Image (cartoon, rainbow, N blue to C red):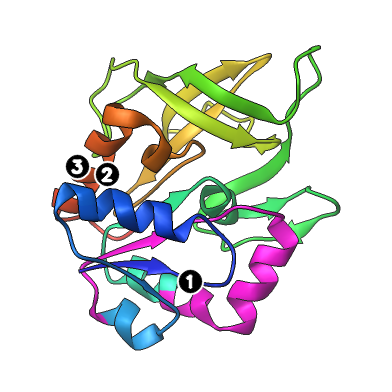
Amino acid sequence: MIAIIDYGMGNLRSVQKAFEFLGYEAVITDSAAEIASASHVILPGVGAFEDAMNRVRETRLDQALLQAAAEGKPVLGICLGMQMMFEHSNENGHFDGLGLFPGTITRLEDHGLKIPHMGWNTLQTRDCPLFDAGDNPCVYFVHSYCMADVSDEWTAATCTYGQTFTAAICRGNVMATQFHPEKSGEAGLNMLRRFAEWKGASAC
């Protein structure tokens, strides 16, 4: 069973529908016990970083997620869920994240392009459970903030929109995407299928 963490913010139903379309059981839940019993865990997110982290901490769902990661369960963050996995974000201040990955989320640089970055864009990928190295899928983004550092070994995909930024991360059993795989057509569905079938690796 796939647990989609419900902390009151995020594209929960669209993620659930994507997994149901693929034939997998996916449950939207705010229950730590249900998250503990799941085989796979997803942290979605849409909205402001500070609000999301406050909600997750108030409900202690951060502890349920960190426990799942520590136990080696496959964990996937989506959009804001990816940003929350980093140590910090500079969105409207300076706030602490979950700390699963090092670094600070920053606003997309102004290169004369519209912000937020909204729409389809192409990935440059490295080997990851979600896709194969060298794949260049076109996926759907909606974001104003990003992880600008693309040099770390856990960077699984990059994308360019004025600047090149990290579009997917993977370390051990924890991975995340800045884009929305559930809104990215067949390419995104294939990523979700691969995640659902993945049995995990060493805990990060």
The disc placed on residue 47 is none
Residue 28 on image: x %, y %: 38, 70
Between discs 3 and 1, the one toward the N terminus: 1
State how far apart marks 1 and 2 are (Cα).
18 Å
Which residue occupies 36% across, 46% down?
171
Q: Nearer the viewer, residue 7 or 204?
A: 7
Residue holding disc 2: 192
Which residue is located at x 55 percent, y 72 percent? 7
Q: Quadrant of residue 25?
A: bottom left
The image quadrant of residue 17 is: bottom left
What element does badge 3 sit on? helix
Q: From what the image shows, is residue 9 above or below residue 156?
A: below
**Residue 172 seen by the camera:** no
Q: Which residue in the protein does label 3 denote?
A: 194
Amino acid type at image mark 2: Leu
Kindly state the secondary structure of the residue where label 1 is placed.
loop
Q: For marks 3 and 1, give the CA distance.
A: 22 Å
Q: Is residue 85 left or right of residue 74?
A: right
Residue stretch rendered in magenta on the structure? 37-64
Count of numbered marks:
3
Residue sitting nearer the eye, 175 or 149: 175
Q: Is residue 18 above or below residue 59?
A: above
Q: Amino acid at mark 3?
A: Arg
Q: Quadrant of the N terminus?
A: bottom left
**Nearer the observer, disc 3 or disc 1?**
1
Describe the element under mark 2 as helix, strand or loop. Answer: helix
- Image quadrant in which you'd find residue 75: bottom left
Residue at which label 1 appears = 6
Percent x, y for residue 102?
57, 49
Look at the numbered discs 2 and 3 and tell me whether their residues touch, using CB distance below 8 Å.
Answer: yes
